[in-house]
Amino acid sequence: MELTRRHALAGAAGIAAAPLFSAISANAATPLADKQAPSFYRYKVGDIQVTVVSDGKNVFKLEDSFITNAKKEEVSAALEKAFLPSDMFTIYFAPLVLNTGGKLVVIDTGNGALAKANSKGANGLFAENMVAAGFDPKAVDMVVISHFHTDHVNGLLTADGTPAFPNAEVLVPATEWKFWMDDGEMSRAPAGRMQGLFKNNRNIFEAGLKKKVTPYEWGKEVAPGLLAVETIGHTPGHTSYVLSSGSDKVFVQSDVTNNPNPFATNPGWHAFFDQDGDVAEKTRRRIYDMVAVEKLQVQGFHYPFPGLGHVEKDGNGYRVIPAPWNPTI
C-alpha cells in the first residue's frame, strides 16, 4: 500500500496524542458500580397509576424434575432458542403498587426480608424498591394477594415478623384461604414442599397477621378498578385481575405463566410448582386465547422486568411482545 503524505501526518498526530489520551483515561477512571439503581417502572391505566416494583430474581440449575411432562433436553433447547442459558432457569418477581387517586393498593408482596438476606440481595427487594419509588408502607390502604406461594405472601411480614403494611386491609381469594387454612388439607399434604407451604402460610396469616384478612370472591371488584378473575390450577384459588379505568384495561395475570420463555411458547408444559398441571394448562390456554383476541395488555408477575406486553398466538403456543419502555408517564 502506498503511504501518502496525508497518511503519514495523520499517523504522526495519533502517536503524539497517544500519551495525552492515556493520561486523560487514567485520570477519568471511576470505581466500578456494585449495584443497580432501584428498580421500578410507572405507567397509567386511565386515571390509575401503576408502579411495577421489582423484587429481584431467582436463578437456579435446571433439573429433570422442573417441568414434569417434558424432557430436560427439550427445555434446554427452548431456553437456548430464546437466547437464554440452556442449563439454568431464571424466575423474576414484580409486585404492583396502584395509586387509584383515593387508595394506595399493593398487589402481592414478593419474597420478603428474610429472602433478601438468604439470597444475598438477589431477591426480597420489594420493600426497599417500593420506598425508593416514593411509597410509605404505612400509607398502603389495601394489600391484594393473588395466591399463597412464598414469593407472593412472604413480604406481608417484616424481618422481625410484624406486619409490613400495618394500616392496610389484607384481601385474599376466598377459595385460596379455605384450602390453606383447612386442617384436613394440611394433614394430607405430601411431605416436602407442600407441607412447607402450609407451615409458611399458617405462620404468616395466623401468627403474623393473626387472621386479620378479608376473603374476596371472583367476579367482583376487589379494589377500585380491580376485578378478580378465576385462574385456577397453579393453586386451588389462584386469581388474576382486570385493571380498568375509563377505556383502558390491563390483564394482571399473576402466575398464569411463569417466565414466558418457555411457558408461553410451550403452554402445554407443566412446572412442578403448578398444583394441578392439567387445570393450569387449560387456564393458560383459555386466558391467553382471550387476551390475544381482545388485544389486552398483560402484566406478568414473572415476566422479565417491567413485565408489560401483549400476547399473540404463535403456532400451538404464544409469543409475548414486550411493551416499549416509556420515559414519560
Image (cartoon, helix red, strand yellow):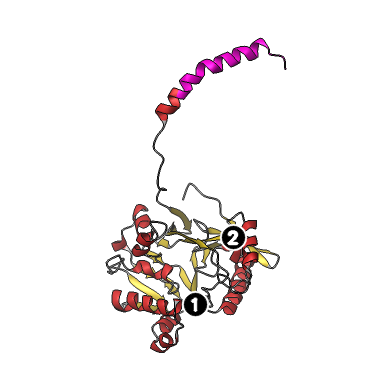
Other-residue count near label 2 (Cα within 10 Å), few / some / many at <14 / 14–19 / ≥20: many
The amino acid at mark 2 is His
Of helix, strand and loop, which one carries label 1?
loop
State the residue in front, 36 or 306.
36
* Viewer-proximal residue among 280 and 99: 280
Instruction: Assign the N terminus to one quadrant of the image.
Output: top right
Magenta-colored span: 1-22
**CB contact under 8 Å: marks 1 and 2:** no
Q: Visible in this render: residue 103? A: no
Residue drawn where x is 42% and y is 27% of the image: 26
Q: Residue at x 65, y 57 (%)?
A: 81
Residue 77 occupies which quadrant of the picture? Answer: bottom right
- The residue that mark 1 highlights is 235
The kind of secondary structure element at disc 2 is: strand
The stretch drawn in magenta includes residue 15: yes
From the image, tell me which residue sits under label 2: 310
> Is residue 218 rendered magenta in the image?
no
Residue kind at label 1, given as amino acid type: Thr
| Front-most of residues 35 and 15 | 15
Q: Is residue 282 visible?
A: yes
